[in-house]
Image: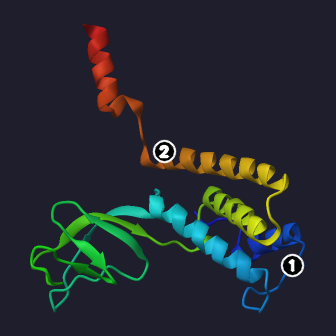
């Protein structure tokens, strides 16, 4: 699942488009890196918050010895299936008791953060193009180059969505709308 587009490579592909030379390290003091890296982080977060096959799962969270449930540092969101709960900080808040104590495990859907270097290729390409567009606009303003990159970002998103649908095994035949249509056709 790991992509071929490492963060350093992606940044070095962006820098010449912003009129800068490539770098050998992302930890150096560079004014354009100060624009690019936050854009990559923001675009990555926006993408991951949607929930994809590679970062959203059904899971069960268990209370520890103190009856608290930790959600983990890489958790973006947790949506419980059967009970009310809210993520506050790194713990699960119990709105029924107005505290952080739980007597039983809590099942739900979790969305986790994934670092850029661990993204599927299509997701990395989408983040890269989106960050490039935002960094370019911030640094140089709006030009015609942006239209080309928007088209490429759209193509990467379409590829990402196609992969998502394949991995989730979505099928039109399993929808309520399809069953109604089939039922109406039989009548």
Name the residue at 40% across, 31% down. Answer: 172
Name the residue at 58% across, 51% down. Answer: 160
The residues bearing labels 1 and 2 have C-alpha atoms spaced at a distance of 36 Å
**Residue 120: quadrant of the picture:** bottom right
Q: Which mark is residue 9?
A: none
Q: Is 16 drawn above or below residue 71 in the view shown?
A: above
Scheme by which the image is coloured:
rainbow
Name the residue at 67% across, 48% down. Answer: 154
Q: Going from the N terminus, do you reach mark 1 or mark 2 first? A: 1
Of the pair 142 and 109, the residue shown nearer to us? 142
Name the residue at 27% across, 9% down. Answer: 186
- Which of the image's four quarters has the N terminus? bottom right
Q: Is 40 drawn above or below residue 53 in the view shown?
A: below
Query: Circle 1 — which element?
Result: loop
Residue 117 visible, this angle: no
Query: Circle 2 — which element?
Result: helix
Q: Alpha-carbon neighbours of circle 2 within 10 Å: few (<14), some, or many (≥20)?
A: some
Label pair 1/2, CB-CB below 8 angstroms: no
Provide the residue designation for mark 1.
22
Name the residue at the top extreme: 187
Residue 179 visible, this angle: yes
Mark nearest the camera among 1 and 2 is 1
Name the residue at the front extreme: 141
Expressed as whole percent of the image width and height from the top left, the position of residue 37 reads: 68, 78
- Which of the image's four quarters has the C terminus? top left
Expressed as whole percent of the image width and height from the top left, the position of residue 81 reads: 21, 60
Expressed as whole percent of the image width and height from the top left, the position of residue 53 reads: 46, 56
Expressed as whole percent of the image width and height from the top left, the position of residue 165 reads: 48, 44
Q: Which mark is residue 165?
A: 2
Q: Is 185 drawn above or below residue 127 in the view shown?
A: above
Q: Alpha-carbon neighbours of circle 1 within 10 Å: few (<14), some, or many (≥20)?
A: some
């Amino acid at each position: 699942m790991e992509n071929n587009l490492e963060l350093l490579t992606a940044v070095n592909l962006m820098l010449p488009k912003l009129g800068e030379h490539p770098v050998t390290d992302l930890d150096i003091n560079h004014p354009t890196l100060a624009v690019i890296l936050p854009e990559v982080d923001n675009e990555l977060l926006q993408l991951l918050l949607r929930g994809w096959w590679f970062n959203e799962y059904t899971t069960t969270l268990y209370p520890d010895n103190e009856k608290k449930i930790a959600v983990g540092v890489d958790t973006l969101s947790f949506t419980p299936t059967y009970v009310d709960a809210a993520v506050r900080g790194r713990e699960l808040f119990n709105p029924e008791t107005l505290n952080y104590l739980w007597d039983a495990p809590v099942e739900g859907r979790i969305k986790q953060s994934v670092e850029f270097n661990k993204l599927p290729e299509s997701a990395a390409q989408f983040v890269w193009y989106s960050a490039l567009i935002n960094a370019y606009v911030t640094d140089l303003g709006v030009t015609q180059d942006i239209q080309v990159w928007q088209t490429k970002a759209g193509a990467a998103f379409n590829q990402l969505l196609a992969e998502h649908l394949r991995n989730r095994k979505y099928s039109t035949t399993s929808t309520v709308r399809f069953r109604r249509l089939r039922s109406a056709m039989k009548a």
